[in-house]
Image (spheres, grey):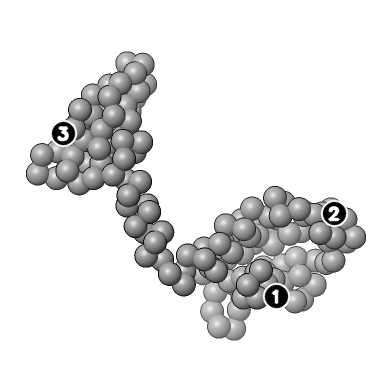
Amino acid sequence: MKRFWEAALAVPRLEGGYGVVLDGRPLRLPGGNILTTERRPLAEAIAEEWHKAGGIKGGEMRQDDVPLTRLLGAAQERIAPAPKPMVEGLAKYGETDLLCYRAEDHRLAARQAEGAGCAAQHHPGPDAGAASPGKPGRASGRGCAA
């Protein structure tokens, strides 16, 4: 895609929140919606990535040049309209052993124990326990059983 703008700026929106304008025109997402965020620093970071994308007007840009735009755009157009599938998918991931895997190396396992540890140790269920080093645990609210 050819860069068609010279200036990218973060701006407050009349409706609230912040957006990005390219040469004074609002940045639109593939679905036609105007990109918006509640946070000014995020709008500024997105404006900065558009400022850098493609170098100068007429330069070649790629979608990989604007990762924050892609992330916020996906959240705004795909997740926000129907968040339930995403929430369910994240909850299902939380039930896997990938969330509480303990390192086999005893030094790293000790550091893990000092840090956050298993999520279920912070929110223990009725039979909560710690995952053993080198063994996966479960963080489903039922505890991290070895």
As drawn, is 30 to the left or to the right of 94? right
**40 above or below 12?**
above
Badge 2 crowding class, 10 Å Cα cut-off, few under 14, some 14 to 19, many 20 or more, is: few
Q: Which residue is mark 3?
A: 129
Callout 3: SS: loop
**Between marks 1 and 3, how big is the CA–CA gap?**
52 Å
Instruction: Identify which residue, 87 or 21, lies in the foreground.
Output: 87
Q: Residue furthest bottom?
A: 14
Q: Residues within 10 Å of mark 3 (few under 14, many from 20)?
A: some
Answer with the quarter of the image where residue 132 lies.
top left
- Of the residues tagged 1 and 3, which is closer to the observer? 3
Q: Quadrant of the C terminus?
A: top left
Mark 1: give few (<14), some (14-19) or many (20+) Cα within 10 Å.
Answer: some
Q: Earlier in the sequence, mark 3 or mark 2?
A: 2
Q: Secondary structure at mark 1?
A: strand
- Residue 96 higher or lower than 52, as above or below: above
Q: Is residue 119 left or right of residue 83?
A: left
Residue 95 percent coordinates (x, y): 28, 44
Of the residues under marks 1 and 3, which one precedes in the sequence? 1
Residue position for label 2: 60
Q: Which quadrant is home to the N terminus?
A: bottom right
Please tell me which residue is depicted at 55% across the width and 83% down the height of the picture.
15
Q: Position of residue 87 (x, y in %)?
A: 36, 59
Q: Position of residue 31 (x, y in %)?
A: 63, 72
- The amino acid at mark 1 is Pro
Q: Residue at x 75, y 76 (%)?
A: 25
Residue marked by disc 1: 26
Q: Is residue 104 visible?
A: yes
Instruction: Name the residue type under label 2.
Output: Glu
Q: Are marks 1 and 3 in contact (CB under 8 Å)?
A: no
